Image (cartoon, rainbow, N blue to C red):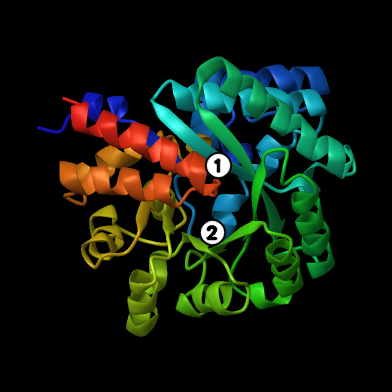
Amino acid sequence: MITRDLLHRLPKAELHVHLDGCIRPATMIDLARAQGVTLPADDPAALARAMFVRNAQNLEEYLEKYTVTLAVMQTPGALERIAYEFVVDSAAENVRYVEVRYCPALHTPALTYAQAVEAPLAGLKRAEAETGTMARLIVCGLRTLEPRVSLDLARLAVDYRRAGVVAFDLAGSERGHPARDHAKAFEHARGNGLACTCHAGEGDGPESIRQALEICGAQRIGHGTRLHEDPDLAAYVCEHGVPLEICLTSNLHTHTVTDLARHPAADYLRRGCMVTLNTDSRLMDATTLTDEYWVAHRTLGLSRADLERVVLNTFRAAFLPEEEKTALLARVTKELSEAA
């Protein structure tokens, strides 16, 4: 019998989660007071309610909440603290490995690029040392910014690839902002040995996924929810084991799906696609990774075998050196076999 407690205890990994979507409400209030920022509420519970996305009609409306969190993330201390607390919170629900992403350009001109990347890396490393949860950073370009900014961010990511940055990503409003415009950034990252993922198939259709794969060379797809609209592309993604960074609750809140029971993730898994489960934005979606697994079980009907397969998929899709990944997978596989 699957219980929420069992899902909490299972070892897990997370690959798609935004740093500016995962701040503790109490921390937001502390940082706002220190920086003179006005928030929608000054009580943690009330602020959590204010940040929860209820009635967004699309991805663009959903993303408006990020302007609030970003307002308190403009100092090195804030970035370091938020990254540290995020890993501590992840470790508390038995997340053994996490890749957290963000866009350093959104922390300028208050910070230099170096400050904007070194501060969260320091927080991740401190939390990893304390909790044992491995934490790595993904640098995001934004579709709505000039392609030259994405190229600068790809260069930044490459510069820190031996310090904890494991990939380059492209995020932001999809419709009307094609990934192909940012192809040079992906080319620079790939050409310098850095892995790439790309948000696609969330705010736009399967053509966006095709661009991410064929033009940008993405090795994973962020979301990929609308993949089923192109059967040939879906077959390719499944046959070639391209990992899908699925975020169930977020997809409901961005109006990518209108009913979680009809989310295509279960069908993708049945077809052999490499499905992973992630939170995307814990604050805006009022969720945890355990919650996402619970939704997958209760709403999509995934069995324990299915969920364990998703767990292992997520570890296999991690942007880690093969030796580290193999060792981590061995430990997790043993734990799964022993979990009661």
The location of residue 310, given as percent across then percent down, is 30, 48
Q: Residue type at mark 1: give it.
A: Glu
User: Could you tell me the amino acid type at mark 2?
Assistant: Leu
The residue shown at (26%, 38%) is 294
Outermost residue toward the front? 323
Residue 190 in the figure: left or right of residue 12: right
| Mark toward the start of the polypeptide (2 vs 1) | 2
Q: Residues within 10 Å of mark 1 (few under 14, many from 20)?
A: many
Is 258 placed left or right of 213 in the picture?
left
Give the spatial CA distance, label 2 vs label 1.
22 Å
Q: Nearer the viewer, residue 270 or 195?
A: 195
Q: Is the C terminus in the top left, top right, bottom left or bottom right quadrant?
A: top left
Residue 328 in which image quadrant: top left
* Picture layout, residue 285 above or below residue 42: below
Q: Residues within 10 Å of mark 2 (few under 14, many from 20)?
A: many
The dot on residue 152 is: none
Q: Are marks 2 and 1 in contact (CB under 8 Å)?
A: no
The x and y percentages for residue 153 are 78, 55
Q: Residue at x 80, y 38 (%)?
A: 116
Looking at the image, residue 322 lies above or below residue 231:
above
Q: Which residue is mark 2?
A: 59
Q: Which percent across, then down, holds residue 103?
A: 71, 48
Between 230 and 114, the one lying in front of the other is 114
Residue identifier under label 1: 99
| Residue 171 in sight here | no
As drawn, 40 above or below 253: above
| 10, above or below 138, in the image | above
The answer to whether one can see residue 74 in this image is yes
Which residue shows up at 73% across the image and 38% down it?
A: 163
Q: Residue at x 74, y 25 (%)?
A: 78
